[in-house]
Image (cartoon, rainbow, N blue to C red):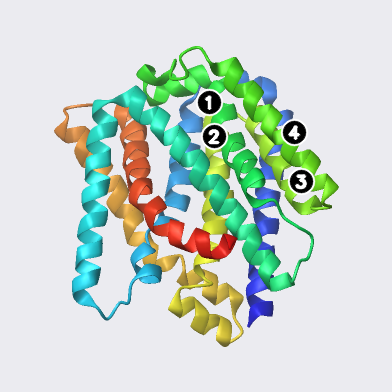
């Protein structure tokens, strides 16, 4: 069964690379048009990316708790929702401080998740070349998060999301850019020295995506086609229904079974975001993307805490 699990992981890795590669090529090809066009289409792409990525975080209870224990399940869901609600309130109250914490949290979550994904591949392929997981995680997490948010192109995107976030970096944008570049350069050097060419390719792709694509597009492609896909592939290694599909020899069915149970969360997230906007008396046109992002970020807080257990297991 390990062979079919490995096959799925490798296919998902290839797909995520192709998606990022296509985005990079299109960004180069249409650079002038993108710079001169309105940002509305980028907002649409960002919302589509959220729709693709949201289900990957909706199965925490299925992979961390025994489904037969109703009391534990109910307590888990109650605490999960309570933490998310508090996070929503905090983000809507303290926009800039909350956003800075989200940036840090996202960089950690994305980087460790990607390193754990690669570790799962290593475990099944019996890779013997040493993989410096946390160095890679630092670069892989900060590249897709920090670079798009400190570039010159980030102003229009942040104004559309929430004007209060434009100067979130407090003038340290060049410093943040420099540190991320130094970390990435060092990580690439160590990966090449260790002949971890696959991981080096991943970092180069993430760098090119971050510096060529408009911020919202870079986020859309990364979140929907890289992070969510790889995390979902990892879920199949634990989710009982996916494991059953693997036993029957179907990697495709195993992946689908890790996606479908999370789709109700997609509808719920957007409904809750719309209700928050309307209850605040705001316009859906102006606030829906911002509030949708807030809800997703808020859900990421308990999601990170729960997936930390899976991450530790993968990285050990």
Nearer the camera: disc 4 or disc 3: 4
Per the image, label 4 sits on a secondary structure element best described as helix
Residue depicted at x 51% and y 53%: 228
Local packing at callout 4 (Cα closer than 10 Å; few below 14, some 14-19, many 20+) is some
The answer to whether the residue labelled 4 contacts the one labelled 3, judged by CB atoms less than 8 Å apart, is no
Quickly name the residue at label 3: 200
Label located before the other in sequence (4 or 3) = 4
Q: Is residue 205 left or right of residue 170?
A: right
Q: Residue 149 carries which label?
A: 1
Label located before the other in sequence (3 or 2) = 2
Please count the marks in the image.
4
**Considering the image in quadrants, where does the C terminus appear?**
bottom right
Q: Quadrant of residue 3?
A: bottom right
| Cα–Cα span, label 4 and label 3 | 10 Å
Quickly name the residue at label 4: 185
Is there any visible trace of residue 25 in the rendered image?
Answer: no
Residue 127: x %, y % from top left: 76, 66
Residue depicted at x 45% and y 73%: 239
Per the image, label 2 sits on a secondary structure element best described as helix
Residue 279: x %, y % from top left: 15, 34
Per the image, label 3 sits on a secondary structure element best described as helix
Nearer the camera: disc 1 or disc 4: 4
Q: Is residue 226 left or right of residue 129?
A: left
Quickly name the residue at label 2: 145
The answer to whether the residue labelled 3 contacts the one labelled 2, judged by CB atoms less than 8 Å apart, is no
Per the image, label 1 sits on a secondary structure element best described as helix
Residue depicted at x 43% and y 19%: 168
| Cα–Cα span, label 1 and label 4 | 19 Å
The answer to whether the residue labelled 2 contacts the one labelled 1, judged by CB atoms less than 8 Å apart, is yes
The answer to whether the residue labelled 3 contacts the one labelled 1, judged by CB atoms less than 8 Å apart, is no
């Amino acid at each position: 069964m390990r062979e079919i699990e490995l096959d799925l992981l490798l296919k998902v890795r290839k797909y995520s690379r192709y998606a990022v590669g296509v985005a990079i090529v299109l960004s180069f090809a249409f650079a002038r048009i993108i710079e001169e066009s309105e940002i509305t289409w980028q907002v649409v792409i960002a919302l589509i990316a959220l729709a693709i990525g949201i289900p990957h975080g909706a199965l925490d209870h299925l992979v961390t708790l025994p489904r037969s224990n109703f009391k534990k399940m109910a307590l888990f869901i109650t605490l999960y929702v309570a933490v998310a609600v508090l996070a929503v309130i905090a983000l809507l109250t303290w926009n800039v401080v909350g956003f800075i914490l989200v940036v840090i949290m996202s960089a950690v979550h994305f980087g460790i998740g990607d390193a754990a994904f690669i570790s799962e591949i290593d475990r099944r392929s019996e890779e013997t070349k040493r993989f410096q997981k946390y160095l890679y995680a630092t670069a892989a997490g900060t590249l897709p998060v920090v670079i798009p948010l400190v570039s010159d192109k980030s102003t229009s995107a942040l104004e559309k999301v929430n004007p209060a976030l434009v100067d979130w970096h407090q003038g340290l944008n060049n410093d943040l850019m420099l540190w991320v570049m130094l970390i990435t350069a060092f990580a690439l050097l160590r990966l090449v020295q260790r002949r971890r060419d696959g991981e080096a390719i991943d970092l180069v792709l993430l760098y090119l995506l971050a510096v060529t694509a408009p911020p919202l597009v870079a986020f859309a492609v990364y979140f929907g086609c890289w992070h969510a896909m790889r995390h979902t592939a990892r879920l199949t290694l634990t989710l009982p229904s996916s494991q059953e599909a693997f036993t029957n020899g179907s990697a495709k069915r195993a992946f689908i079974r890790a996606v479908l149970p999370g789709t109700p969360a997609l509808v719920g997230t957007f409904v809750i975001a719309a209700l928050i906007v309307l209850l605040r008396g705001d316009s859906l046109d102006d606030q829906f993307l911002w509030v949708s992002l807030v809800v997703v970020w808020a859900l990421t807080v308990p999601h990170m805490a729960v997936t930390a257990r899976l991450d530790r297991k993968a990285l050990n």
